[in-house]
Amino acid sequence: MSAATAAARRAAHAGMIGSAARRNAWTLGLLGFLAFLLVFTKLIQPSYGVTGVQGLAISVLPLALAAVGQAIVVISGGIDLSIGAMMALTSVISASLMKGQPEEFGIAVVVIVLLLGLALGAINGGLVVVTRVPDIVVTLAMSFVWAGCALLVLKTPGGGSAKWIKELVTGSLGNEWIPKAAVVLVLVVAVIWVPLRRSGLGLSIYAIGSNRLAAFRSGVSVGRTKVIAYALMGLFAALGGLSLTASTGIGTPVPGPYTLMSVAAVVLGGVNLAGGRGGVFGALVAVVILQLIRTDMTFLNVNTNLAVVVQGVILIGVVMIGSLVQIRRARA
Amino acid sequence: MSGVAGASGARSAWLTAAAWRRQFRDRPLIPLVGLLALLVLLLWLLKPEVISVGWVGVTLRAAIPLAILAACQTLTFLTGGIDLSVGAVASMSGFVVATLVGGPGLGVALIVALVIAALVGLLTGVGVGVFRVHPLIMTLGMSLVVLGLANVWQLIMVKTGSGVPAELRWLGSGTVGDVLPNSLLVFVPLAALILILLRRSGFGRLLYAIGDNPVASRLAGARSWQVLIVLYVISALLAAVAGFLLGGLTNVASVTLADTSVLPSVAAAVIGGTSIMGGRGGYGGTIVGALILTVLTSLLAALGFPEAVRQILFGSIIVAVAAAYTRVTSES
């Protein structure tokens, strides 16, 4: 009995190493691609340096936070098409609350907006669970609701931002090569997602995405886990909204391209749209890659519209390669 | 129990919830038309002056391009897919026609636009069918590609200028006696074709089969990749036609003209009772769904709600209808 369990454990262990290697193969490939892009950027624009890296960090921050949120929901087997609208809503709320208020009030605003993000996400998740309507339909409809709420708060771009929040994402920390925006991003992910991922709740999120029925039969509360995954997404959407306010100094009620770009980044990052597979780190690397490609296009004086084309082609191409690898593995 | 059969038994069969449920599941058109009638009645009660012969014409005229775009969603939903590239393809087609009509003439312009659309559909179909890329990602990537290329085309053609041809304006916005829009000339044959395609043709049955059970349909000898390629070509062609009509309706040539119609087209198909998970639904419901959305928009506008409140109500009502639908039709 104990020998059998030991053997089973060893087999499971070997399987885990194998799957970990496979998971990392995708991320390593992405990192290689990122390194290549950085070298390429330096080659075509020798002056690319500190300011370039700082600009990169600030410009990826909103999409990176959105991508982390989207990744969590996709891993749990859902998808949220209202994330862009949620970011717009949280951004206008924070901007209109902070306008003309003392600096210290900003802390209260951040707390309020983050709690609001959790609530917005939980509403989305709750509706998905209670109505049993497919995630994509519920969140698509809710994107109208959140965008409408954003318009209710502010009709036109406006509001303001506390100074310290702006300073939180601009400039560098210690070494000039370490932009504050990147530090904020890493800290946020490290504080919120990493411990969660290692907890039972994180495992449950992967479990309901991988096999709902099996998760249910092993005692995972599927509905509750799903709501929590959506609430976390809402939290990251609120962080993304705050970062929009911080980097622009105002709130804009019109949703940016973050919904679809976050889905694209998540898929590029190796998260399976069917759920249960992938991680947040790959999605973050994918976000940087997408932004760097855009930067390179400007350096090369390529028409910005062609840059959009290239982004689309890379998205399709990379996903095609990924699915070809999968098809081949399935045959082997 | 069988003792009470007979007249009273037949009556009680109509009175039980299960019977109603079965009725709704088998004939989704009845509750949908009921909802449509309810909305019109509501509008008539609240704003009697709005309802007129002209209003019918305006509503139909606005619903037709939406219904055609929703056809793309219905067909792709049936196989478990989705087509988010309809907005980009429709805008591109309308724009290409508007820029080319001054030079080579209307006939050539229409053919060029349709050929480009078919090529886009072919690429999408190959990606989804052969490379098994998730339709959401594939069509999202393609819409980036199409939008970017359309923008480049716009820059090239900026000197030539553009204008929606008078023929398309007649087709898209003209009406016969204020009631029947001329676009019915396109829509009626198209809708009949789609309905026949789905109900009576082998291709239609294959769409349902692939969406209902991909493994079973493969084992039964269906070559799903061929079906999917043809499906996405058809979807892109339909989007192009919708683009022509939208251009004519709004008298605007813009590369983002139809972008705002993408989400409503998905909503129309969902409200119409086509399952986004595949295998269940039809085009009849979608047509009514498009009408419901158009009347709803008209109702919310007539009641004088600000844009923000309109969006919120729009989203909430879509969730409510989808939830009611799922509740009524799901097997308990």
Image: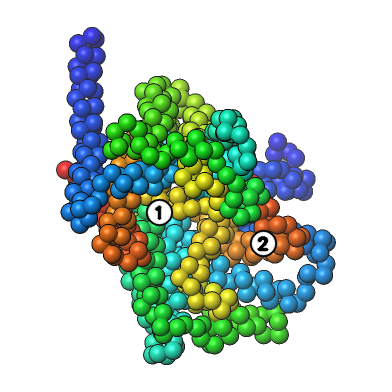
Which residue does the image show at 36% across and 72% down from the upper left?
A: B152
- Which amino acid, mark 1? Leu
Callout 2: chain? B
Would you say the residues marked 2 and 1 are in contact, meaning their CB atoms lie under 8 Å apart?
no
Residue that label 1 marks: B136
Q: Horizontal and vertical percent for residue B199?
A: 49, 65
B59 with respect to B151 (left or right): right
Q: Callout 1 environment at 10 Å: few (<14), some (14 to 19), or many (20+)? A: some
| Lower position in the chain sequence, tag 2 or tag 1 | 1
Q: Is A169 above or below relative to B222?
A: above
Q: Callout 2 environment at 10 Å: few (<14), some (14 to 19), or many (20+)? A: some
Which residue does the image show at 73% across and 77% down from the upper left?
A: B54
Q: Is B83 above or below relative to B169?
A: above
**How many labels, in total?**
2
Q: Horizontal and vertical percent for residue A313?
A: 29, 59
Most foreground residue, B290 or A235: A235
Q: Which label number is shown at residue B297?
A: 2
Most foreground residue, A169 or A238: A169
Q: Horizontal and vertical percent for residue A118?
A: 54, 33
Whole-Å distance between the Cαs marked 2 and 1?
27 Å
Q: Is A119 above or below relative to B12?
A: above
B300 with respect to B153 (left or right): right
Residue A213 visible in image = yes
- Which amino acid, mark 2? Thr
Which residue does the image show at 66% across and 43% down from the upper left?
A: B18
Q: Which label number is shown at residue A224?
A: none
Callout 1: chain? B
For label 2, the SS is helix
